[in-house]
Image (spheres, rainbow, N blue to C red):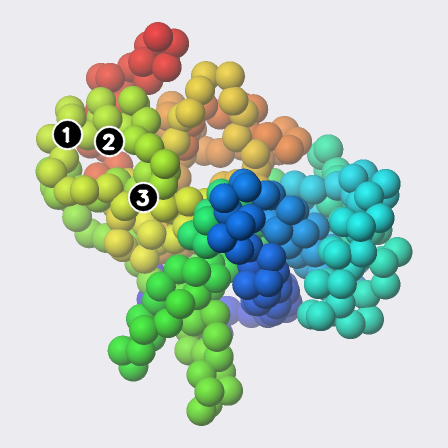
Amino acid sequence: MSASPSSSTAYAAEREAALSAVITVSHLCRRVQQVMVTADSIDKKDKSPVTVADYAAQGIIIHELTKKFPEYPFIAEEDSQVLQTNEALRQSVHKYANEFSPELSEEALLAAIEAGNTASTDAKVWWTLDPIDGTLGFLRRGQYAVALALMVDNRPVLGVLGCPALPYTTPSGEEKIGCVLVAVQGQGAFIRALDEDAESGSATEVPISVSQNSNPVNAVFTESHAHTSPLNQKITELLQVKAEPVRIDSQCKYAMVARGQSDIYLRLSSLDYQEKIWDHAPGACIVEEAGGVVRDFDGKELDYSLGRTLCGNVGICCTNKNLNGIVYDAIREVDPKAILSK
């Protein structure tokens, strides 16, 4: 896709506001990680840093976007229940939130977090948010994402992924750590550095597109940082894939496909697990605007109309267009349900 981000005014205000909010909390996440994630916290498997960042990020994004678009409700990952009773955690969350949103009172912060605790919505337009996707990546100083999508008629029309640790090469050839991907339906997908250029005071948005690879032998899979699933192993063996997979946490997997650095991302961890809508709507929107295809394992579109989960779908199949049919042939041949039921 090569459309300019200014070629259409559809959702322009929402795009600008969403980008600003995601960039702000991406810096917040970096700040919390810098201060709270230490060798000692990693050794002890202390999850408090990501808990603080998670709540602060959700509070700021919902607060800022609700000010601008009060009629758009949120379905987000977190609620405020723990913060209501844990004073020390509440104060820590508020402290970091205030570094990036100084006017945000503790009461307003809690109200914003709780506003995301929505089971479902009948609204025509709404947001879904994962303030930090990739808990383990955040805690090991690896990859994680701030993931936000605007939904219209229960379909994502705007997706933003803030990837604070994902390397990115700017148009001038400068190597940066941290990038933001954004897409609006019908307008293409774009990437920019998270940090603004010191000289210009801005960051240039660059169009991105999925790969054109059509040879499954050369296909690059994106997989969990931790392991290769038995399902992926079967499919890669069937396709005779030679390339090493890209191992990465969070919706950065979608970012890798959208940037053309990976060709295939498959997800079906168990037959019982229902995927959360916020774990896929932002990344799926970006991949599709970059020219890719995101469906479930039966080839059905993802159904975001059923509440907080994709309970009407089984698995996630994200590919470039050239490999899509080949991958579905492989999925049918290996019979994922038989593999996962063993």
Image coordinates for residue 170, horizontal then vertical, percent = 33, 75
Q: Determine if residue 270 is in view.
A: yes
Residue at image x 44%, y 83%?
Answer: 197
Image coordinates for residue 185, horizontal then vertical, percent = 48, 55
Of residues 269 and 10, the one drawn nearer to the viewer in this rendering: 269
Residue 239 image label: 1
Marked residue nearer the N-terminal end (2 or 3):
3
Q: From the image, tell me which residue sits under label 2.
A: 327
**In the image, what residue type sits under mark 3?**
Arg
Marked residue nearer the N-terminal end (2 or 1):
1
C-alpha span from label 2 to label 3: 19 Å
Marked residue nearer the N-terminal end (1 or 3):
1
| Residue that protrudes farthest toward the right in the picture | 107
| Residue that protrudes farthest toward the bottom in the picture | 199
Image-based side of 267 in relation to 15, left or right = left
C-alpha span from label 1 to label 3: 19 Å
**In the image, what residue type sits under mark 2?**
Val
Q: From the image, tell me which residue sits under label 3.
A: 247
**Tag 2's secondary structure?**
helix
Residue 338, above or below 261:
above
**In the image, what residue type sits under mark 1?**
Leu
**Tag 1's secondary structure?**
helix
Quarter of the figure with residue 209: bottom left
Image-based side of 64 in relation to 161, left or right = right
Of residues 272 and 212, the one drawn nearer to the viewer in this rendering: 272
**Tag 3's secondary structure?**
strand
